[in-house]
Amino acid sequence: MSIIEEARKYLVRHYGNLISVAEPEFDARTKTWLAELKSDYPRIIHDDRRPNERILKFLSLRGLGIIKFGDDLKFIEATSREICVQNLSSFLGMWQERAERIIVKASSDHLAQINETQTVLSKISMIISNLLQKEIISEKEIAFNPPSIQGKIRRYLKLLEGLDLVRQIEGGYTYGNLFTELGRQTKNFQEFKIAILSYVIRERYSALKETIGISQLETIVHVDSCYYRPALEAENLLYWTSDSIINRYAKLYGRLSPLRITHILGELVNVKALECEDRYYFGNEKLFSRMLDLKNEMGELSYRRA
């Protein structure tokens, strides 16, 4: 019996039908065969314009575990089924996070135009407005605020410093090189503000969530993701009603007022992050094409073993 037949025989006896095995590779140093466990995880996706049809797609997940054999094809060890299932669950969580990053990167120009986003990130607008008017924000001006506000302003300044939008000088902060460059590329303050907010969202969305707290913007991104993540899995634009998006939001993130979700959908349509026609929501073709490019650039999900 060949090594691949041995690996498949072990697979059938010990793992469920969601897990498969890659072609085993021989490690000359240890004189062992290693067969990687993987999964082409099925996703069933619907389109509300064709309710009787279902789209079946697969997420390719690599590195769920291994089966090891000696050079005599005798079994040595394998990742347990329980660990494989845990890794599979982790990968699905990783895919959700990756899809969200893809959506944010592609949509940041649109997300930055939403009034609520600008309210959430108003401290950034305050910083850039001050730097445009007088070039320096002094430590004395920062210290004038209550401690909680001071802390938030300083966190934003550090975040902007990391993007070369501001730089620290003796006694305060001034503008950075990217601040100047974006100023040259835009025609007025509104365009400039949107350009900076878009760049910050695109490059530092995770940091905004973790260190500053932007729950309102997170909710907007989650609603957007409720549509675009299934579309990315289908690799095709879908047509969904608001009810489908509301139900998906509840499944992924917990219950949220339908009034709130419908309002956010309207905001996303207003800035062309989504389209809406005959009560169906569907994706912006240009944005979606960019998302597909980003998805392909990132490749398969896998753990890399040392």
Image (spheres, rainbow, N blue to C red):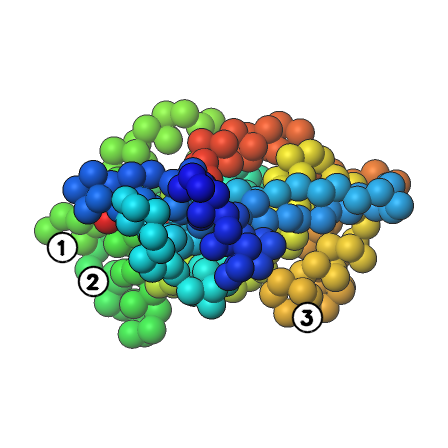
The residue nearer to you, when weighing 188 against 92, is 92
Mark 1: amino acid: Gly
Can residue 35 be spotted in the picture? Answer: yes
**In this rendering, position of residue 81 left or right of residue 140:** right
Q: Which residue is drawn at 52% across and 29% down?
A: 293
Q: In this view, does 255 lie to the left or right of 125?
A: right
Residue 31 position by quadrant: top left
Label located before the other in sequence (1 or 3) = 1
The x and y percentages for residue 106 are 52, 37
Whichever of callouts 2 and 1 sits on the residue coming sooner in the sequence is 2
From the top left corner, tell me how far across and down residue 130 is, in percent.
34, 48
Give the crowd class for mark 1: few <14, some 14-19, many >=20 residues within 10 Å: few
Picture quadrant of residue 107: top right
Residue type pointed to by label 2: Lys
Secondary structure of the residue carrying numbered label 1 = loop
Which dot marks residue 255?
3
Query: On the image, numbered disc 1 is attached to which residue?
Result: 171
Relative vertical location of residue 288 with respect to residue 185 in this rendering, above or below: below
Q: Residue 248 carries which label?
A: none
Against 121, is 188 above or below? above
Dot 3: what SS?
Answer: loop
* Residue marked by disc 2: 140
Please report the residue visible at 67 percent of the width from the left and 65 percent of the height from the top.
Answer: 251
